Amino acid sequence: PEPLKVLGKRKGLNVGNAIGGRWFRDPAYKALMARECNMLVAENEGKWQALEPRPGEYQFEAADAMYAWARQQGMLVRGHNLIWQDAKWLPKWVNEYDFGAQPAQAAEALLRKHIVTVCDHFGGIIHSYDVVNEAVDPASGALRANVFTQHLGAVEQIDLAFRVAREHAPGAQLVYNDYMRADEGSTKHREGVLKLLHALKSRGTPVHALGLQSHIGSWDEVSSGSQHQRVWRQFLDEVTGMGLDLLVTEFDVNDRKLPADVTARDAGVAALAKDYLDVTFSYPQCRDFLMWGMADHASWLQEWKEAPRTDGLPMRPTPFDDHLRAKPLRDAIA
Ligand code: G3I
């Protein structure tokens, strides 16, 4: 079959994958990625925690190595992410930082220093940046709080992050990235994201696109596929109506509610993907499709303990199996 990147190119879509450090040492996995993809994102190596584990001690080696390999292969590179709003995923030292007597100035200085250092280091090689990741609390739709929102204001801080990124990565597409879904459980999340995007647009914030993480799957037993499609189209209409582009940034399919039988499960996963991608790919504003892992054994979902399968079986969330053989999900994407 033709590689996904070839099919993507015909449609004007980049096809990419998030690669983790462990899989970056696996030649067979890398060969699969090089065959199918023309875009790379580092699964963890571009995060603040990875780049600056201790204040002032920047460690660029792991990300540099991945990006250099991508460029050798002729791939584009996405940066993920400059600021992760969920305090849980900010470096511990940032959460515990002493902002002193003038906390607003100190918080702005710290935020600027991080974005400037990272953008200046990678320079023009980054095609697009997730400038801000996961700012909306999915349960309430409100903006999440962290040390930056506390001292600078929530929308103000997000706006600042985008402005600093634009100055120091002038050629990059600047993205707000989040994991809102189409199901009913995600209603507040979608509303919160729309509210944030409207607020940013009305301030003139240089945000170019919404990153649709697209960790889809069998979350909601009630809604049918067509209900999801209607809700998703309505959401994407409103986003594109603001002049924003769309990117699928972290695609995978959680199969926790699908049967154990592998044939039935793989068919179910493919059907969920097709429903979702039929709608998402119908928008000409959607230019990138990135998988969050290409083979089942390389998926973060195998280690995610919050919502495993009740039968304890490993999930089958990606287009290739543990032996790098194509699954029905690959056909669905194609
Ligand atoms: O590398 C260390 C290893 O040395 C250590 O022994 C081990 C013990 O826990 O941890 C390893 O680090 C883990 C890292 O993944 C690499 O496997 C971290 O604990 C773990 O928290 C980290 O999880 C990542 C998670 O983001 C948090 O950063 C996942 O791999 C990654 O897939 C996930 O990706 C996120 C996106 O960035 C944002 N959207 C949601 C997506 C899925 O949660």
Image (cartoon, helix red, strand yellow):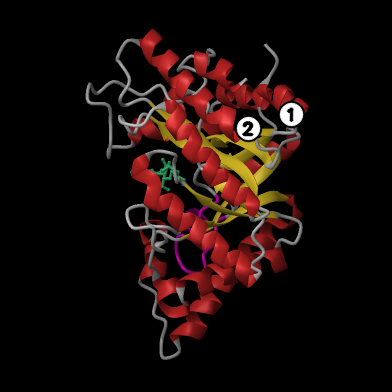
Q: Quadrant of the C terminus?
A: top right
Task: Say if 101 sits above or below 83 in the image.
Answer: below
Residue assigned mark 2: 281
Q: Secondary structure at mark 1?
A: helix
Residue assigned mark 1: 11
Image-based side of 108 in relation to 16, left or right: left
At a point 41% along the width and 91% down the height, the residue shown is: 101
At a point 22% along the width and 21% down the height, the residue shown is: 311
> Residue 50 versus residue 178: which sits nearer the camera?
178
Query: Residue flagged by tag 1: what amino acid is it?
Result: Lys
Indicate the quadrant where residue 123 lies.
bottom right
Look at the numbered discs 1 and 2 and tell me whether their residues touch, using CB distance below 8 Å: yes
Give coordinates of residue 262: x percent, y percent. 37, 11
Q: Which residues are magenta?
A: 46-59
Q: Quadrant of the N terminus?
A: top right
Q: Determine whether the beta carbon of the residue marked 1 sits less than 8 angstroms from the nearest atom of ligand 1.
A: no
Image-based side of 51 in relation to 223, left or right: right
Task: Say if 200 sits above or below 276 in the image.
Answer: below
Separation of marks 1 and 2 at Cα, in angstroms: 9 Å
> Residue 318 versus residue 207: which sits nearer the camera?
207
At a point 58% along the width and 24% down the height, the residue shown is: 27
Q: Which comes before the other along the chain, label 1 or label 2?
A: 1
Indicate the quadrant where residue 9 lies.
top right
For label 2, the crowd category at 10 Å Cα-Cα, with few meaning under 14, some 14 to 19 and many 20 or more, is many
Give coordinates of residue 5: x percent, y percent. 70, 26
The prevailing secondary structure element of the residues shown in magenta is: loop
